[in-house]
Image (cartoon, helix red, strand yellow):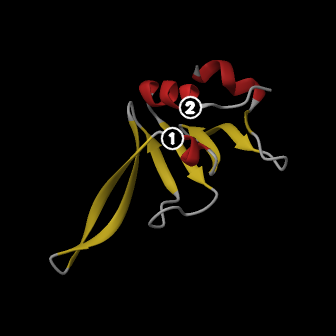
Amino acid sequence: MKVVNLYDLKQMGNKGGCTIQLIHHFPFGMGLGHLKKDYIEFKRVGIVDGKAVEVTLREPYSRDLLQIVKSIKQRQKLIAYRYKEGKLLFVKKEASDVL
């Protein structure tokens, strides 16, 4: 099975429809993110002028972020998963559909 790298994440972001789940809620409690062309988008509720509003955080692709990705889905299909040995690997059947 193929290991997921930064280039693969960017390619999935270009195609669209992919989400990532993080192992740790790093930083700011970011657990679920949407892959975009140049960044990963996280939506959270934040306080602005004393009011709760939805805030969009954009995190650039980085090796640090790749190390804490638990799983990747495309339109509810599991594409990649971090196995116990620590590697983020594509699910064999789905890898060719994504890239």
**Which residue is denoted by mark 1 in the rendering?**
62
Compared to residue 95, the image places residue 31 above or below, namely below
- In the picture, the disc for residue 29 is none
The residue at 58%/23% (across/down) is 98
Compared to residue 99, the image places residue 31 above or below, namely below
**Regarding mark 1 in the picture, which secondary structure is present there?**
loop
Coordinates of residue 82 in the picture (x, y in percent): 73, 45
Coordinates of residue 38 in the picture (x, y in percent): 38, 33
Identity of the residue furthest to the left in this view: 49
The residue at 84%/46% (across/down) is 85
The residue at 80%/46% (across/down) is 83
Distance (Cα) linking label 2 and label 1: 7 Å
Looking at the image, do the residues carrying marks 2 and 1 touch, with CB atoms under 8 Å apart? yes
The quarter of the picture where residue 39 lies is top left
Instruction: Tell how many labels.
Output: 2
Mark 2 or mark 1: name the one nearer the start of the chain: 2
- In the picture, the disc for residue 6 is 2
**Regarding mark 2 in the picture, which secondary structure is present there?**
helix
Which amino acid type is shown beneath numbered disc 2? Leu
The residue at 77%/26% (across/down) is 92
